[in-house]
Amino acid sequence: MQNRASILGLLMILLTHLIYGQDTSYKPLATVVVSANKLTEKRIQSPVAISILSPKQIQETKAPRLDYLLNKVSGVYMPTIGNEQHMMSIRQPISLKGLYLYLEDGMPIRTSGLFSSNAFIEINTDAIYSIEVLKGPASALYGAEAIGGVVNILTHPIPTQKQLTLTSQVSHVGYKKISLHSAIPGDKGSWDITGSWTDQKNGVTEYSDYQKKAASIKHHFAITKKLSGYQTLQYIDYYTQMTGSLDSIKFFQKNFSSQQTFTYRQINALRFRQNLQYEWNQNSITTLNAMYRNNTMDQNPTYSIASTSNPTKFKGQVNSNHFDSYVVDVQHRWNLNAIHSKLIVGGYLDATQQNLVAHYIDIYKDTTLGKYTRFSYPTKDSLITSYHTNISNKALYVNWISDISTSIHFNMAMRYDDFEYAFANELTSGTPSANNHFTRFTPKIGMTYNKNNVGGYMNYSEGFVPPQITEIYNAIRVPYLLPQQFTNAEIGGWGHFNKLYAEISVYQLKGNNEIISVRQTDGVNLNQNAGGTKHIGVEYQFKYAFKPTIEILWNGTYAKHQYVNTQIKAVDVSGNEMNAAPHFFHNLTLQWKPIKNIFTSLEWMHQSKYFMDETNTTSYPGFDVANLRMSYQFKRSEIWLHILNLTNAYYSTMATKNFSVKGTSAYSYYIGDARSISMGWRWDIIK
């Protein structure tokens, strides 16, 4: 009750400022976004809940990982599970599920059907210019998996001046990073080049080292006044030791030792993109994007280790997952000035070949040390899985935008997706070879109103998720699965009053045909479309400037996530709250610039308690974490000091319980970062 009273009091203060002192010199709502309609337009013309992390915010935060940025966005919680590996929660509980679409400059980082919760490992974070987070279903423009939200990473634009910058960071818990950024403008072409090296050794948790090398090249060019474009090439080389989560005994004992000595995950990701834009005239533009992806993940994962009757011998696996993708996205835009409208039509094609090979391994444990010390391949029959899948996604989409008046804007979009999976099992055992076909129409309709810096929007949208490859081809027979379907209705508003900017969104999201594992009469567990969910929430963001040098930012969400007509492991959980679904998550930041060249910020993140299991019998209390950041600029340099987790709070970023398992192994806790003191230096060699 005390927390609710505090929140209500703060809301009353903010509403008081909303009522008095209007300022017509509006700037935030003039922000241009590209994610809402696949083209650049003002925020006030986008009938969606969208948040923007600006270049200024990114530069001031100097985040060692992407979650430190995204957790500043209202309605977003991105828990780290170690070394850039992560989960996500946007209008959904915290999970690894493929309910989000991750883009780079408007193009998907991965193929639909091959979702990875760790997709952000596959980007170069030092090449980020800004980030847009589109909340709610966006399948009408972007297709599958755009359910909880779309995160669009925008890389550096065309450079206007020469730049060469060297940046380095170190922390007292073994973190090191160095990066180099170069920008070279030119009349006929310009270049933007970024490279970075990250290394983590001897952290708080045993066996948790990682290393990442990333390189990005972006080349802008103009062949004629009408034809221009850019090319990007990005390569990621990532390796991490896999230590896994803690059980309940280790978590409460604060025991950070690990049984692991050889588990790992290695990712190599290459992406090449060609963008072309032809301006037929000032009212007609065609844009073409072609992309090639080459991605390999090799791992000896902790989650595959299983016990046997011998306490010194365990089973595990080593696997390799690879895919090659060829993607084309072409769209044409007409400005229909006579009727104050725009029409965008487009087509999308993704052709991907994926293959997975997995081998059994025998794992040996030293019970005295309490560690797995080595592994070996069985002398025969070590091959568990060997298959390849051809994935085809063809789509057509249309978007109509109309200015009904200077204050009212109408937006309607529709997309048709056609998915084909051609699965070929190269073994005589396991899942039989099969072809699967999915189609779906997804609409979206919305309207915005804005006048004198006050406005609002409403929209209705639908989204869908076809079965993931691992959901449909992981049993002894192929289940009959349909795409998961979601419907969303929301309303929101914004305003800029004197020193206050405020934005709020209210939504209801419903899911049907959600895929869960169901035990069959013959004892086999098979995935089925047997689940339903309901999600209701409020997202809010406020920014108040006490004076030009002091401002406060409050971003957060209140949400409730429930099961509807759902049975899990023969237990009816209908009406229960979903596990890993906290009601509250907010980020409160106070920023102060005492003098021109000094920046300080104090950040407080709060997460409320939530149920760890679907039966709502066990809960986790949530956490409170504070971060302090200070920086000083001088001449061509900047130095900074960050104390992250200022109070050294002990917490879990994600805690779950398997209600069908007894004992401490039923519990899983991913440890939040302990307090770290880091220092950094940026040198503008050329500026």
Image (cartoon, grey):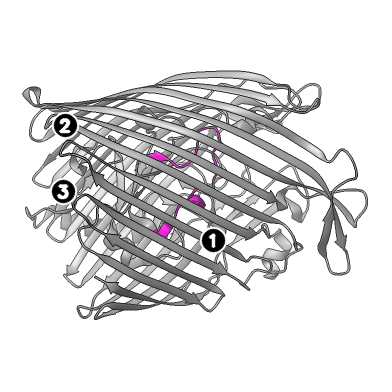
Residue 118 drawn in magenta: yes
Q: Secondary structure at mark 1?
A: strand
Give the vertical position of 643 relative to 96 (above or below): below
Q: Nearer the viewer, mark 2 or mark 3?
A: 3
Q: Which mark is residue 499?
A: none
Judge left or right: residue 673 versus residue 594.
right
Task: Indicate the position of residue 615 as horizontal and vertical percent values.
Answer: 64, 41
Q: Amino acid at mark 2?
A: His
Q: Nearer the viewer, mark 2 or mark 1?
A: 1
Q: Which residue is mark 3?
A: 30
The residues bearing labels 1 and 3 have C-alpha atoms spaced at a distance of: 37 Å
What is the magenta segment's predominant secondary structure? loop
| Stretch of the chain drawn in magenta | 106-126
Considering only order in the chain, which callout, 3 or 2, is on the residue closer to the N terminus?
3
Rendered image quadrant of residue 372? bottom right
Residue closest to the far right: 310
Question: 196 or 261: nearer the eye?
Answer: 196
Q: Which mark is residue 409?
A: 2
Give the vertical position of 420 relative to 407 (above or below): above
**Does the CB distance between marks 2 and 1 fall below 8 Å?**
no
Task: Indicate the position of residue 114 as horizontal and vertical percent values.
Answer: 56, 36
Q: Pick the quarter of the image with the N terminus.
A: bottom left
Q: Which residue is mark 1?
A: 212
Residue 199 drawn in magenta: no
The residues bearing labels 2 and 1 have C-alpha atoms spaced at a distance of: 45 Å
Considering only order in the chain, which callout, 3 or 1, is on the residue closer to the N terminus?
3
Give the vertical position of 285 relative to 605 (above or below): above
